[in-house]
Structures are given as structure tokens and as C-alpha cells.
Image (cartoon, grey):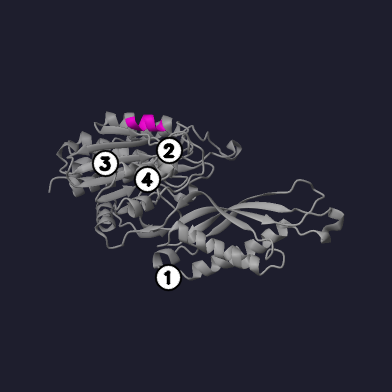
Amino acid sequence: MTERATGAIDGEAMVADLTALIRIPSITGSEEGVAAWAADALRALGLAVEVLRPDLVAHRDDPAWPGEEMPRTSLPVVIGRTGRAGGRRVILSGHLDVVPPGDPGTWTTDPWGAEIRDGALYGRGACDMKGGVASILAAVRALRSSGDLALLEGELMVVLVPSEEDGGQGTLAAIRAGATAGLAIITEPTNLDVVVAHAGAITFRLTVPGKAAHASQRREGVSALDNLFVLTQALAADETRRNAAETDPLMTALGLPYPTIIGIVAGGEWASTVLDRVIADGRYGVRLGQSPAAAADELRACIAEACAADPFLRDHPATVEITGGQFGSARVPSDHPLPVGLADVAEAVLGRRPALLGEPYGADMQMFVNHGGTPCVMFGPGDVRVAHSADEHVPLAEVEECARVLATWVSREIGPG
């Protein structure tokens, strides 16, 4: 059974799917068009398809709601089902939203053009993670054309979601609608290794006060920019301490599993006035095993301690606001049947055994693990180092190899014994 499915990958259809996906600009918050395409694609493969559009007001009241970075008026979640309902269930999942392309002048291709060059397909989202979505579709198509899809003794659920890039609202909505399983794979870009652990992140805003004065009387004022420098020094020391305290080999191997950055700084209204306020937005890592709320407490404690030690900030402390998406961390034991079984399949299909890794970024894996009670790993085509970048791309050979592994894995997990 598994050999039939592995040999039935339709490379041309796979490239056509990925091309179509890239040519639909699906920036986070605007995923209706790509969701409609994905629903049609799953129906064409014979799956029973449901498109969920949860009430956003009610959804934001969910205790596990992860925040959001982008405004939205809808949250389209596409769920396809096939196999024997009521049997053992596995999930293949991917997100359909992408980050903005940035300055087109930094690209050598059209970000929405899906150009193929030297065996790789280029475009925004090619790596993160429409290449992985194309692998899922190719795997299901192979199972169908080989006849194996009709022989499944369990249920295969394909979950394609919006809003991964800003916290995971889409996957949370899918989970609340019943998208849980015995095992799940998200096809994020992992270079076809298996990610069993990942850190998380929160975004924050610092409002840092100063005291205005005329530039000619600079010493009469207190620059909020100088005060921000005091706080960034404290954050740097905090980053060093938090990373040095980590002992899990999966995370220490990363070198800096929990980075802190300031990404946006704004302030000032007049060049000849000492700044009396600076606003800085940044990202703070969530440690493995830590909740976003606990990370926020650490961040606030760091800023409070730094303010207390500064003569001006002691009486005029900076404020900390948690904004945007909030990614928790997650881990599946390395000896769990999911990563072990997937690694066995990958080794048999590809001829090499994938490494079991930890990663420093947030992902929807934590939604399935922490809120869906579903063991989940990440395994997909592409290198995360080109995600969100100009000339983002994914090797088409890896997209096909991923599809072959997924088709075999589904057959082994819920096919006839």
C-alpha cells in the first residue's frame, strides 16, 4: 500500500498547486481568497470540506485567544475530511497566510509571480509555508490516485488555517470546532528534519518618559531616548541571563533560543526639543515550558528593576504593554511514537534519518499541543532562514520529497494493518 502511494506523486499537479497558491496574495488578515481556493482544491480531491468563519467577537473572548497583529473582518478555516469517521484520526495542517512582501525593489522576482529558477519556486510564502501546503495536497492526491485513500481505516483531516503569522487564531478556531487527533504534522519549513520543540514569543510596547527642554538648554531636560538606552541595556542583560539558564539540549544547541529585540522606535516632534517620550515595540522570547503570561511577568520585572535603579525612571517609570500575537512554547518527547514513527518513514523513503530539533520561533504546533491535546511535530520543505525574506523560495524537490513521506506516513498510521 505505501509503495503505491509513494510512487504516485504527481509533480506537475504539485507545481501547479504551489503556483496558484503563491499567486493569491494572502497577507495575514486577508485570507478569504486563498481559503476559497484551498476549499475547492480539497473538494476536487474527494474530501468532505467545511469552511469555518467563527464570530470574531466571541473568539476574542476565548481564554486561549493568542492576540493578533493585523486587523481582520473574517477568519476562514478550511477543514477537509476523508477516511473512516470515528476511526483513529491524524491531522495534516498548514497555514495559508503570509507576511507582507516588503519593498519590491529588494526582490529579483515578482513576489506574487511564482517564478521557477534552478529547481526552486520563488514568491512570498513559498517557504513559509505554501510549499508545505502543496506537499499536503500532493500527498492526498497520491493516496487517492493509488487507491489507498479509499482503504483508510482511520480518518485523515486536513486543516488549512489563517492567522498563524500573528498568533494562531485560525488553529485555535479549528481546535474549538473539533480539529483534534491522535497525531498531527504541520508542514512548516524544517529542511525535512523533525521539529519536536519550539520556543514562543510575545510582542510588547514600552512607553518611555523623559523631560522636554529647549535644545540649547539640553541639560535642563532628560532625553527619553537616553532612558530607552538604559532599558535596552537591561533587556540585553536579561536576554543573556535567560538563555544561560536554559539546560535542554534541544534549545541550548540553538545558541540563542530566546532572543529579545526592539523592532520599532518612534518619538519626538521637534528637532530642537529634548524628547519627552519614546515608544518602542519589540519581541520577547517565551522559554520552553513557559506560558506567554509568565514571560510577560519576566519582562515586566526586568523593566521595573531597571527603572527602580535609575534616578529619573524611579519616579517616572516606563510602562509595558503586551500587544499583538502571543505564541506559547511546546514540546513533544523525542521518544514519542509521533517523531519516532515519522523519522522511521522519512528514513525509509528518503534514505536519511531526519534530525529531531528544537527551534526558536513560535508556531501553531503549540496550539495543537497546549490547547488541542494533540501530539504535534513540524516537518516540511524549505529553509526557515529564507522565510519572510526577499526572494523567498522553496526547492521543488523538497516539496515532492515531503509529499512522499506524508503519503507513506498516513498509510502506515491509518491504513490497513
Comes first in the chain, label 4 or label 1:
4
Label 2, label 4: how many angstroms apart (C-alpha)?
A: 12 Å
Give SS at disc 3: strand
The residue wearing badge 1 is: 247
Callout 3, which amino acid? Met
Residue drawn at 49 percent across, 33 percent down = 112
Callout 2, which amino acid? Leu
The image position of residue 321, as x and y in percent, is 56, 53
Label 2, label 3: how many angstroms apart (C-alpha)?
A: 24 Å
Please tell me whether residue 37 is drawn above or below residue 310 in the rendered image: above
Label 3, label 4: how many angstroms apart (C-alpha)?
A: 15 Å
Give SS at disc 2: helix
- Position of 176 with respect to 237 (left or right) is left
The residue wearing badge 2 is: 56
Callout 1, which amino acid? Thr
- Visible residue check, residue 306: yes
The residue wearing badge 4 is: 172
Q: Which residues are magenta?
A: 34-39
